[in-house]
Image (cartoon, rainbow, N blue to C red):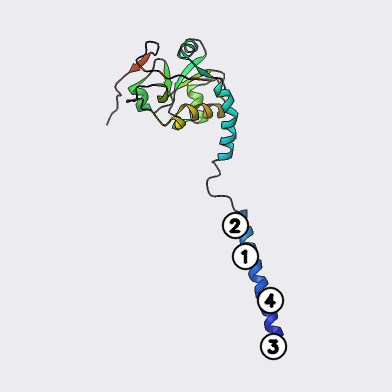
Amino acid sequence: MLSRKKSVRNSLICGLIAIATFIGIGLAASAQEAPGSAEIDYDGFMELSGEVWELRANRLLTLEDFNAMAAESNTIILDARSRYAFDMGHIAGAVNLPFSDFTDEKLAEVIPNRDTRVLIYCNNNFTDDAEPIPLKRISLALNIPTFINLYGYGYENIYELGVLTETTHPDVDWIALEPQYEN
């Protein structure tokens, strides 16, 4: 009888240790960070996107207004497409900083004053749908992340070409060049 009590007691102890182990493993697992990088804040991006949504809706310009603003002082036209696409063709007077190169430092080189009016455009503003401006999926047009990122970097005076036109339109001062690259 004593041996049976000892066996039950040992079984209970083993069971309690097993339960405690499973609880400990579960707590440890839930305490670990979710997979990903600490330098990626999706929730922060979504919050920023929501903040920008209404502002952007009020900053979409006609071609006439875009051109009028471009002619004013303290304004730049920023082309965030690749250097290759920019070199093949762009709106006259635009400066190029590819979206993938956006950092505080590089933006400050191109736009030293955060109060500068920044005009943006992308492939999806043009119906040509040929190099250097092939159409992108509408929900992934470069204007959207460009606007959000500029705002997130502290540039709040952003306006966007909000119409569909063609590079050959008489009011689009499109400069088409052949890119010059060394092999």
Q: Given contact means CB atoms under 8 Å apart, are the residues at marks 3 and 1 in contact?
A: no
Question: Can you give x and y, in whole percent of width and height, for residue 4 in the image?
Answer: 69, 86
Q: CA distance from mark 4 to mark 3?
A: 14 Å
**Marks 3 and 1, Cα distance to the nearest angstrom?**
28 Å
Residue bearing the label numbered 4: 12
Please identify the quarter of the rendering in which residue 23 is found.
Answer: bottom right
Disc with the residue nearer the chain's start (2 vs 4): 4
Question: For the view shown, which residue lies furthest in the bottom direction?
Answer: 1
The residue positioned 60% from the left and 34% from the top of the image is 47
Left or right, 123 with respect to 75, comes to left
For label 3, the residue is 3
What residue is pinned by disc 2?
29
In the image, what residue type sits under mark 3?
Answer: Ser
Q: Which residue is mark 1?
A: 22
- Tag 1: amino acid: Phe
Which of the two residues, 134 or 177, is positioned nearer the viewer here? 134
Mark-to-mark CA distance, 4 and 1:
15 Å
